Image: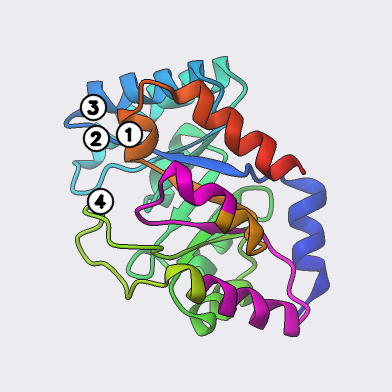
Amino acid sequence: MKKAISEQVLENKAIAHLHYISQGIDQKAHLENIERVLQAGCSWVQLRMKDTRYEDLLATAHQAKILCNSYDATLIINDNVGVAQEVDACGVHLGQEDLSTAHAREILGSEKIIGGTANTFEQALNHLKNNVDYLGMGPLRFTSTKKKLSPVLGFEGYKDLIQKFSAENINIPIIAIGGITEADFQPLQETGLYGVAVSGLLTQSSEKKEIIKKASILWSN
Protein backbone atom coordinates (compact mmCIF):
# COMPACT_ATOMS: atom_id res chain seq x y z
CA MET A 1 0.00 0.00 0.00
CA LYS A 2 1.34 3.47 -0.88
CA LYS A 3 2.74 5.19 2.16
CA ALA A 4 2.09 8.52 0.45
CA ILE A 5 -1.64 8.13 1.08
CA SER A 6 -1.36 8.41 4.85
CA GLU A 7 1.37 11.03 4.65
CA GLN A 8 -0.82 13.24 2.47
CA VAL A 9 -3.75 12.84 4.87
CA LEU A 10 -1.86 13.56 8.07
CA GLU A 11 0.40 16.32 6.73
CA ASN A 12 -1.91 18.29 4.44
CA LYS A 13 -5.47 17.59 5.57
CA ALA A 14 -6.59 17.81 9.17
CA ILE A 15 -9.05 15.01 9.90
CA ALA A 16 -10.91 15.64 13.18
CA HIS A 17 -11.20 12.95 15.82
CA LEU A 18 -14.89 13.71 16.42
CA HIS A 19 -17.29 13.98 13.49
CA TYR A 20 -20.86 15.21 13.86
CA ILE A 21 -23.34 13.78 11.34
CA SER A 22 -26.28 16.15 11.10
CA GLN A 23 -29.83 15.25 12.06
CA GLY A 24 -33.16 17.02 11.78
CA ILE A 25 -36.76 16.63 10.66
CA ASP A 26 -36.31 19.39 8.09
CA GLN A 27 -33.77 21.87 6.73
CA LYS A 28 -34.27 24.30 9.62
CA ALA A 29 -33.72 21.59 12.23
CA HIS A 30 -30.52 20.39 10.54
CA LEU A 31 -29.10 23.90 10.59
CA GLU A 32 -30.15 24.54 14.18
CA ASN A 33 -28.53 21.28 15.31
CA ILE A 34 -25.37 22.07 13.35
CA GLU A 35 -25.12 25.50 14.94
CA ARG A 36 -25.56 24.05 18.42
CA VAL A 37 -22.72 21.56 18.05
CA LEU A 38 -20.50 24.23 16.51
CA GLN A 39 -21.22 26.51 19.47
CA ALA A 40 -20.25 23.61 21.75
CA GLY A 41 -16.85 23.33 20.08
CA CYS A 42 -17.25 20.68 17.38
CA SER A 43 -14.91 21.31 14.45
CA TRP A 44 -16.22 18.78 11.89
CA VAL A 45 -19.74 18.59 10.46
CA GLN A 46 -21.06 16.15 7.90
CA LEU A 47 -24.32 17.36 6.37
CA ARG A 48 -26.37 14.22 5.86
CA MET A 49 -29.85 14.70 4.39
CA LYS A 50 -30.94 11.52 2.66
CA ASP A 51 -34.00 11.53 0.39
CA THR A 52 -33.91 15.32 0.09
CA ARG A 53 -34.50 17.25 -3.14
CA TYR A 54 -31.30 18.56 -4.70
CA GLU A 55 -32.49 22.16 -4.46
CA ASP A 56 -33.29 21.81 -0.76
CA LEU A 57 -30.01 20.06 -0.02
CA LEU A 58 -28.11 22.73 -1.91
CA ALA A 59 -29.83 25.56 -0.04
CA THR A 60 -29.15 23.88 3.30
CA ALA A 61 -25.53 23.22 2.35
CA HIS A 62 -25.00 26.90 1.53
CA GLN A 63 -26.25 27.86 4.99
CA ALA A 64 -24.23 25.09 6.65
CA LYS A 65 -21.11 26.35 4.87
CA ILE A 66 -21.69 29.85 6.25
CA LEU A 67 -22.10 28.43 9.76
CA CYS A 68 -19.01 26.24 9.52
CA ASN A 69 -16.94 29.10 8.13
CA SER A 70 -17.96 31.32 11.04
CA TYR A 71 -16.66 28.70 13.48
CA ASP A 72 -13.62 27.75 11.40
CA ALA A 73 -15.04 24.23 11.10
CA THR A 74 -14.85 21.61 8.35
CA LEU A 75 -18.00 20.95 6.30
CA ILE A 76 -18.35 17.59 4.59
CA ILE A 77 -21.32 16.76 2.37
CA ASN A 78 -22.72 13.26 2.58
CA ASP A 79 -23.23 11.48 -0.74
CA ASN A 80 -23.60 14.45 -3.11
CA VAL A 81 -20.43 15.50 -4.95
CA GLY A 82 -22.34 18.09 -7.00
CA VAL A 83 -23.52 19.92 -3.90
CA ALA A 84 -20.04 19.76 -2.40
CA GLN A 85 -18.68 21.42 -5.54
CA GLU A 86 -21.41 24.03 -5.70
CA VAL A 87 -20.94 25.28 -2.13
CA ASP A 88 -17.16 24.69 -2.09
CA ALA A 89 -17.42 22.36 0.90
CA CYS A 90 -14.24 20.83 2.30
CA GLY A 91 -15.18 17.46 0.85
CA VAL A 92 -17.61 14.55 0.69
CA HIS A 93 -18.34 11.33 2.50
CA LEU A 94 -19.51 8.44 0.34
CA GLY A 95 -21.22 5.20 1.32
CA GLN A 96 -20.99 1.86 -0.44
CA GLU A 97 -24.05 2.64 -2.56
CA ASP A 98 -23.10 6.22 -3.41
CA LEU A 99 -20.86 7.50 -6.20
CA SER A 100 -17.55 5.64 -6.14
CA THR A 101 -14.72 7.29 -4.28
CA ALA A 102 -12.58 6.92 -7.42
CA HIS A 103 -15.05 8.95 -9.48
CA ALA A 104 -15.38 11.51 -6.71
CA ARG A 105 -11.61 11.99 -6.66
CA GLU A 106 -11.60 12.54 -10.43
CA ILE A 107 -14.26 15.23 -10.03
CA LEU A 108 -13.01 16.96 -6.90
CA GLY A 109 -9.27 16.66 -7.44
CA SER A 110 -6.58 16.13 -4.84
CA GLU A 111 -7.29 19.14 -2.62
CA LYS A 112 -10.70 18.09 -1.32
CA ILE A 113 -11.29 15.62 1.50
CA ILE A 114 -12.97 12.33 0.56
CA GLY A 115 -14.13 9.82 3.14
CA GLY A 116 -15.54 6.40 2.39
CA THR A 117 -17.74 4.08 4.41
CA ALA A 118 -16.54 0.50 4.81
CA ASN A 119 -17.71 -2.55 6.71
CA THR A 120 -14.96 -4.99 5.72
CA PHE A 121 -11.20 -4.94 5.20
CA GLU A 122 -11.72 -5.58 1.48
CA GLN A 123 -14.03 -2.57 1.14
CA ALA A 124 -11.48 -0.46 2.98
CA LEU A 125 -8.69 -1.54 0.62
CA ASN A 126 -10.83 -0.57 -2.37
CA HIS A 127 -11.31 2.92 -0.95
CA LEU A 128 -7.59 3.21 -0.27
CA LYS A 129 -6.82 2.45 -3.91
CA ASN A 130 -9.02 5.43 -4.73
CA ASN A 131 -6.98 7.73 -2.47
CA VAL A 132 -9.58 8.43 0.21
CA ASP A 133 -8.42 10.59 3.11
CA TYR A 134 -10.19 8.69 5.89
CA LEU A 135 -12.44 5.69 6.43
CA GLY A 136 -15.73 5.57 8.30
CA MET A 137 -15.95 1.97 9.48
CA GLY A 138 -18.85 0.28 11.22
CA PRO A 139 -21.40 0.01 12.52
CA LEU A 140 -20.32 -0.57 16.08
CA ARG A 141 -23.86 -1.64 16.92
CA PHE A 142 -27.40 -1.32 15.57
CA THR A 143 -28.51 2.19 14.69
CA SER A 144 -31.82 3.43 13.29
CA THR A 145 -30.04 6.27 11.46
CA LYS A 146 -29.30 4.05 8.44
CA LYS A 147 -32.01 2.24 6.50
CA LYS A 148 -29.67 -0.39 5.06
CA LEU A 149 -27.38 -1.38 7.91
CA SER A 150 -24.22 -3.38 7.26
CA PRO A 151 -23.32 -6.28 9.58
CA VAL A 152 -22.48 -5.02 13.07
CA LEU A 153 -18.74 -5.01 13.80
CA GLY A 154 -18.68 -4.68 17.58
CA PHE A 155 -15.47 -3.99 19.50
CA GLU A 156 -13.89 -7.28 18.46
CA GLY A 157 -14.54 -6.46 14.82
CA TYR A 158 -12.66 -3.19 15.15
CA LYS A 159 -9.76 -4.89 16.91
CA ASP A 160 -9.52 -7.41 14.10
CA LEU A 161 -9.56 -4.67 11.45
CA ILE A 162 -6.91 -2.63 13.24
CA GLN A 163 -4.66 -5.71 13.38
CA LYS A 164 -5.11 -6.25 9.63
CA PHE A 165 -4.27 -2.63 8.86
CA SER A 166 -1.22 -2.83 11.09
CA ALA A 167 -0.05 -6.07 9.46
CA GLU A 168 -0.23 -4.38 6.05
CA ASN A 169 1.50 -1.25 7.39
CA ILE A 170 -1.50 0.87 6.44
CA ASN A 171 -1.79 4.14 8.32
CA ILE A 172 -4.99 6.08 7.62
CA PRO A 173 -7.53 7.72 9.93
CA ILE A 174 -10.26 5.21 10.77
CA ILE A 175 -13.45 6.68 12.22
CA ALA A 176 -15.84 4.40 14.10
CA ILE A 177 -19.48 4.87 13.11
CA GLY A 178 -22.87 3.50 14.06
CA GLY A 179 -24.72 3.68 17.37
CA ILE A 180 -21.80 5.09 19.35
CA THR A 181 -22.36 6.33 22.91
CA GLU A 182 -20.15 8.46 25.11
CA ALA A 183 -19.23 5.37 27.13
CA ASP A 184 -17.77 3.84 23.95
CA PHE A 185 -15.20 6.59 23.43
CA GLN A 186 -12.44 5.20 25.63
CA PRO A 187 -12.65 1.52 24.58
CA LEU A 188 -12.74 2.59 20.92
CA GLN A 189 -9.74 4.87 21.41
CA GLU A 190 -7.89 2.03 23.11
CA THR A 191 -8.35 -0.21 20.05
CA GLY A 192 -6.27 2.26 18.06
CA LEU A 193 -9.13 3.91 16.15
CA TYR A 194 -8.47 7.47 15.04
CA GLY A 195 -11.85 8.83 16.11
CA VAL A 196 -15.63 8.54 16.14
CA ALA A 197 -18.61 9.86 14.21
CA VAL A 198 -21.78 10.54 16.16
CA SER A 199 -25.21 11.84 15.33
CA GLY A 200 -27.97 11.38 17.91
CA LEU A 201 -25.46 11.48 20.77
CA LEU A 202 -24.69 15.16 20.15
CA THR A 203 -28.05 16.13 18.68
CA GLN A 204 -29.99 15.02 21.74
CA SER A 205 -27.50 15.79 24.51
CA SER A 206 -27.80 18.78 26.83
CA GLU A 207 -24.10 18.38 27.60
CA LYS A 208 -22.59 18.80 24.15
CA LYS A 209 -19.55 20.74 25.38
CA GLU A 210 -18.65 18.00 27.85
CA ILE A 211 -18.93 15.26 25.22
CA ILE A 212 -16.81 17.18 22.73
CA LYS A 213 -14.23 17.97 25.39
CA LYS A 214 -14.06 14.32 26.46
CA ALA A 215 -13.35 13.22 22.89
CA SER A 216 -10.73 15.94 22.49
CA ILE A 217 -8.89 14.90 25.65
CA LEU A 218 -9.03 11.18 24.85
CA TRP A 219 -7.67 11.50 21.34
CA SER A 220 -5.05 14.10 22.17
CA ASN A 221 -3.19 11.64 24.39
Marking on residue 145: 4
Marking on residue 27: 3
Earlier in the chain: of badge 4 and badge 2, it is 2
x 54%, y 81%: residue: 121
Inter-mark Cα distance, 1 to 4: 21 Å
Earlier in the chain: of badge 1 and badge 4, it is 1
Inter-mark Cα distance, 3 to 1: 10 Å
- At mark 2, the secondary structure is helix
Mark 1 crowd level (few <14, some 14–19, many ≥20, 10 Å Cα): some
Quarter holding the N terminus is bottom right
The location of residue 193, given as percent across then percent down, is: 62, 60
* Circle 1: residue type: Leu
Which residue occupies the foreground of this view, 17 or 209?
Answer: 209
- At mark 1, the secondary structure is helix
Mark 2 crowd level (few <14, some 14–19, many ≥20, 10 Å Cα): few
Inter-mark Cα distance, 4 to 2: 23 Å
- At mark 3, the secondary structure is helix
- At mark 4, the secondary structure is loop
Which residue occupies the foreground of this view, 184 or 93?
Answer: 184
x 73%, y 77%: residue: 166
Is 155 situated above or below 190?
A: below
Please give the range of residues in magenta: 158-186
* Circle 4: residue type: Thr
Cβ atoms at labels 2 and 1 below 8 Å apart: yes
Q: Is residue 14 visible?
A: no
Side of 94 relative to 215 (left or right): left
